[in-house]
Image: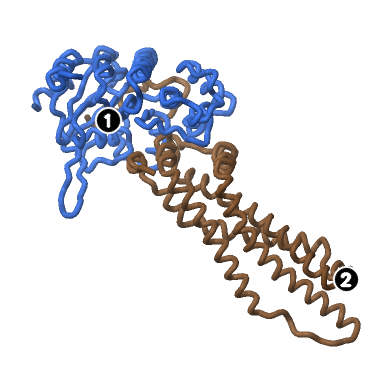
Chain colours: A brown, B blue
Amino acid sequence: MSDSQSAAADPAGASPRESDAQGRSQLPLREVLTFFVFQSLRLRMGRLVVVLLGVSFAIAFLAVLLGTETVLTGIQKLSAQANDGAGEGGGSFQRWWIVVALLIATAGIANAVLMSVTERVKEIGTLKCLGARALHIVEIFLFETLLLGTLGGFFGGVLGVAALATLFSAQLGPDFLLVFGWSDALRLVGISVVVAQVIALIAAIVPVYFAARIDPAEAMRYEV
Amino acid sequence: MENNVTNAADAPAPAARPSAPPSVIVEDAKKYYYMGGETVRAVDGIDLKIEKGEYVSIMGPSGSGKTTLFNIVGGLTKPTEGTVYIDRTDISKLDAGELAWLRCRKIGYIFQTFNLVPIMTALQNVMLPLIFAGIGRGEREDRAHEMLKLVGLGDRSTHKPTELSGGQQQRVAIARAFVNNPAIVLADEPTGNLDLKTGLHIIDMMIEMNKRRGVTMLCNTHDQKIIKASDRIVWVCDGKVERIEKPAEAQAAFADRAPNA
């Protein structure tokens, strides 16, 4: 049967409402969140709490190191005012600790996403059968990871600030509030969230790439 | 053998409107897999024409190429050679995005293992194809509700798949497959995981959908009850169409082969 013949026949059978010869399947952001991301996170809460703890601790570590720098420079300024003495800056080796902490957090998130993808191969295949495009699969997993990163960043930031406050208020007493105010705390939490989001996105690249490439025909034969 | 194929393909199907073009045309489809230097001819030159509204069953032993044929018709696998038309669209010419749209709008799938999305309620599962089709929120919910009522699960819309029995899950899957008013529904051993009684119920439901909505059905099955209800039975063996029969003939053949069944 030639193309022209097929094209010549008019849409007798098609339902009248939809002119659907050309089109793109859709998945609005709102549905990505309400149908997939939130429900998936809720369902996998147990395991995600473990991942979240790991990420939070790594980010808290980052927050403490960054905060310590703030506090130390603050103290230096105070003491400079008092006796004109000059001190040297915080150790640059701290940056290595930060890198290590972030790598651990990245590995933790990557592992969580990878598990989420592998146990949902069939679901991904089904979604593709129902009309999902690769882009939609990417969105589903990317937003899930991003939410995970945001939560981890927020909890980690808060945890770090709390640790910092406990640590230094024990040493400095009320002077601590002179060198570390609410704006510093907010800035620290903000940095934590952004850093955690960035590493979440980096961690998601490989697993999400796999997820998007899943072949629906193969996925249907896949046994978990 | 070839004679049989052409004859059956030319014969008008009872449910088809004579003017309507066929829902599915498969022309000399071949699918070869290359494994370790060997060529596996999963589908080796199949011609098939399915009229609109027809109910066709595919039968054949394991490894005969049924599933591959199925995946080719469903736009899940690209044939190595040959063309497939779904509702007048040559699907080999479509890119990934267009294929997704075709799967969304034209094809419904029913699986042996139900394959509902486990994190979603029955209603949300039925709503999924409507989301992909870009149907607005209100209409989406109404239509999904309607479909669930139609399959007798109006009161189970908020249940998750794990809270439903196998038969109920398959009914949700049927609702999901038909909710977008597809041109064709592909069912891969829909009763394979169900007990006899539940299976019968599912079969009745699919037949009713097929007849009432005029949706073309292609069903991959071993189930005699489905065979009885279908318009034609396509026997596949070694990647080729062995013969195409009417239900009565197939029943006789079935009885010959498996007298105990």
**How far across and down, in percent of the image, does residue B128 sit?**
49, 32
Q: Which residue of the protein is positioned furthest toward the front in this rendering?
A: B260
The tag earlier along the polypeptide, 2 or 1, is: 1
Say which chain tag 1 marks: A
The dot on residue A175 is: 2
Q: Secondary structure at mark 2?
A: helix
Whole-number angstrom distance, CA of label 2 to CA of label 1: 84 Å
Q: Closest to the observer: A109 or A135?
A: A109
**How far across and down, in percent of the image, does residue B38 sit?**
15, 51
Within 10 angstroms of label 1, few (less than 14), some, or many (20 or more) residues? few
Of the 4 image quadrants, the one containing the C terminus of chain B is: top left
Of the 4 image quadrants, the one containing the N terminus of chain B is: top left
What amino acid does circle 2 point to? Asp
Can you tell which quarter of the image residue A38 is in?
top right
Q: Nearer the viewer, mark 2 or mark 1?
A: 2
Q: Closest to the observer: B148 or B96?
A: B148
Q: Closest to the observer: A96 or A216?
A: A96
Judge from the rendering whether residue B173 lies leftward or rightward of residue B192; answer left or right.
right
Within 10 angstroms of label 2, few (less than 14), some, or many (20 or more) residues? few
**How far across and down, in percent of the image, does residue A71 sit?**
79, 72
Label 1 sits on residue:
A4
